[in-house]
Amino acid sequence: MKMVEAIVKPFKLDEVKEALTKAGIQGMTVEEVKGFGRQKGHTELYRGAEYSVDFLPKVRIQILVPDEKAAKVVGVITESAKTGKIGDGKIFVSPVEEVIRIRTGEKGEDAI
Amino acid sequence: MNHAKNLLAFASLTVALGIFLVMSASYAQEAPAAADPAKAQATAPAVAAPAAPAPKLPAYFTGANEDPAKPLWPDATGAATGTWATPAGDGKGDVPDQLKSSDLYDRIAHNLYSINYVWVLIAGFLVMFMQAGFMLVETGLCRAKNAAHTSAMNFLVYPLGCLAFWVYGFAIGWGNWFNGPVPPGWYASLGPGLAALNEGLGLGAAVDAAGKLTGVFSYGLMGTKGFFLGSAVNDVGVLALFFFMMVFMDTTATIPTGAMAERWAWKNFVLFGLWVALPYCLYANWVWGGGFLAQGGINWGLGHGAVDFAGSGVVHAMGGVIALAGAMVLGPRIGKYDSQGRPKAIPCHNVPMVVLGTFILAFGWFGFNPGSTLSGTDLRISFVVVNTMLAGIMGALGAYVALAIKGMKPDPTMLCNGMLAGLVAITAPCAFVDPWAAAVIGTIAGLIVVYSVFFWERLGIDDPVGAISVHGVNGVWGLLCVGIFANGAYGAGWNGVVRDGMVKLYGSDGVRGLLYGDLSQFVMQALNAGVVIVFGFVMAYAWFKISDLITPIRVSKEVEIEGLDMAEVGIPGYTDMPEAEKNLGYGTAMQKSA
């Protein structure tokens, strides 16, 4: 099993969710996060003076998938979250040792 | 493209100003012909009156206590001020056929006073509500982590200021109100009971035949009657004046809480709330309470003396100057300047609060300015209202233009500052100028406020809400505007000045600025502005330095970074807001804290 974590622009969340649902993904976890990458935030003007916004708002999506689906999910997210502009985000894929469904006690891929 | 737009806006504004100036010149020439002959006639017989045998006048004209056993004044119930019309079906009340014309006049006089009282009180209610406007503007303009503290300061300054005003402020400011110079034939719009306010200190004291002080001074310095509103001043008119002047003072008291927000220690603020009535009421005495600045026309021949209709100087410049001294003593907020001393923005946390507060203030100003006639029977109130409105809206638009010239977006917090700046500037001249002049005054105020905010910021003075620029700088601008734009139509005999030369030239001696032929009024206004700046600043700077020794003026670095809410008032402004968000301005923009 693989954990796919995608950090995307907040306004792209709906598109990504719909694309994933279409691709047969049945569940995901989403949270609002802040951070910066190579773009290093940006500056804004307020009452004539500049201030820097160091941490930009993003959305982190976590999806748990069987190994064979990971590449497809990554492809769907890449396509649906892309604007082509700086700050589109990143996707991390990592192995998952074990999954347990709390209600039934099922384990492994059955619990996804 | 954007730059071209800015140029266009600037060019059209310049053209508009040019047209206004040309119009002003033509008005200036028409003014003598348009002068009100009725007013001239009204003053003439009054001057001649002492020569003829004095006619018997009702007590509400003379304020006389003919029967010492049953004194009419001070009048604690209002019963002595004319006669309450009592229609009665049983024949015991007024029977119209049996009333003499003097009886009718008694009832008319009572109604006249009633209208004045109701007007002054309702206007005062509106001014009191401005406290809510100040709370919203100042709290909205600071960060969420200081919201409870800032709003609490705006709240408690009302009880603290009112207490101080009742204990000593009113007595200092208005205790010698009857020393105020007035033209012949003048009467107090709130009744003769105000004559009870007749004890004070000053230079050039007049004495009566028995050698006792009469309360009349050539140069009044302060009043001394009415501490705790003692029974000697228990008069319906005095209490109406007390209420109206009290809510005005609280406007001044709440201005520094904005400039000093987000770092001012609570206990030091409480001391300030009890102290602020002192400088305010002293200066108010000099302009409004029969003091030497109001007497400047009589003593020094400078126009009508200091003319400040509703308090650009007394209320706003004083508040702004205290705010300046406070912000200087406190120093800037942590994070306001980077290591090279360049100003950085600390964004506010709630723009809709700022806008709502501005609307409430603009609404309250419709009490502030027209209420300052102290008379609902003075029909000039409609001019005052329209001038107030025009200056306010042009202030907002002026700020918009200034931002556009600088290539900035129309930051709503600056537009709000612009509207308030226009309102502050029109406060002194509102009764004396034409509507076009009100629009010009407001436009310039809106331009000034934007540049002024940047100016103070570059100087290293951190004012989170722009109070110094809105109230201080534009308060001074408003004072000068009387000396520039006043057209002579209103205020004949103001501060007791009736100059024969002016009456001959224009038909009456109204308040007149330099565009309309009285340069001396402008000189007096500039002098008055100098007094409020120097006196207010010195008093406030000394106070903040001294009070810092009693209890520290500034919170610790830890408390300031953490937010003043929990440490100072024990409750967060927003209990369900995540910790990380409280340090922020606009929702998602995270701020470097140092």
Image (cartoon, rainbow, N blue to C red):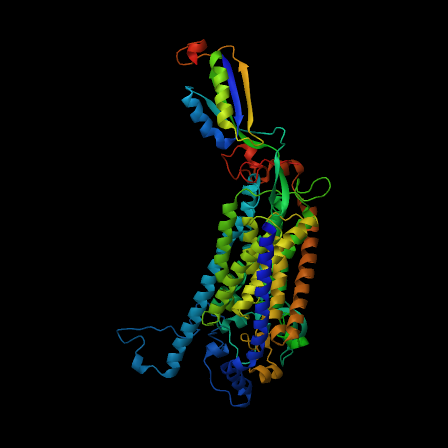
Which of the two residues, A80 or A92, is positioned nearer the viewer here? A80
Residue B251 showing in the rendered view: no
Residue A109: x percent and y percent? Answer: 44, 10
Residue B89: x percent and y percent? Answer: 26, 73
In-image side of B317 versus A3 (left or right): right
Give above or below for B462 relative to B237. Answer: above
Give above or below for B509 relative to B427. Answer: below
Residue B582 showing in the rendered view: yes
Residue B164: x percent and y percent? Answer: 58, 56
Seen as rendered, the residue at the extreme right is: B340
In the rendered picture of this protein, how many numbered marks are placed on residues? 0
Which of the two residues, B246 or A44, is positioned nearer the viewer here? A44
Seen as rendered, the residue at the extreme bottom is: B52
Tell me what residue is drawn at x 48 percent, y 54 percent: B360
Give above or below for A62 relative to B336. Answer: above
Which of the two residues, B533 or B239, is positioned nearer the viewer here? B533
Residue B403: x percent and y percent? Answer: 59, 52
The C terminus of chain B, quarter of image: top right
Give above or below for B50 relative to A68. Answer: below
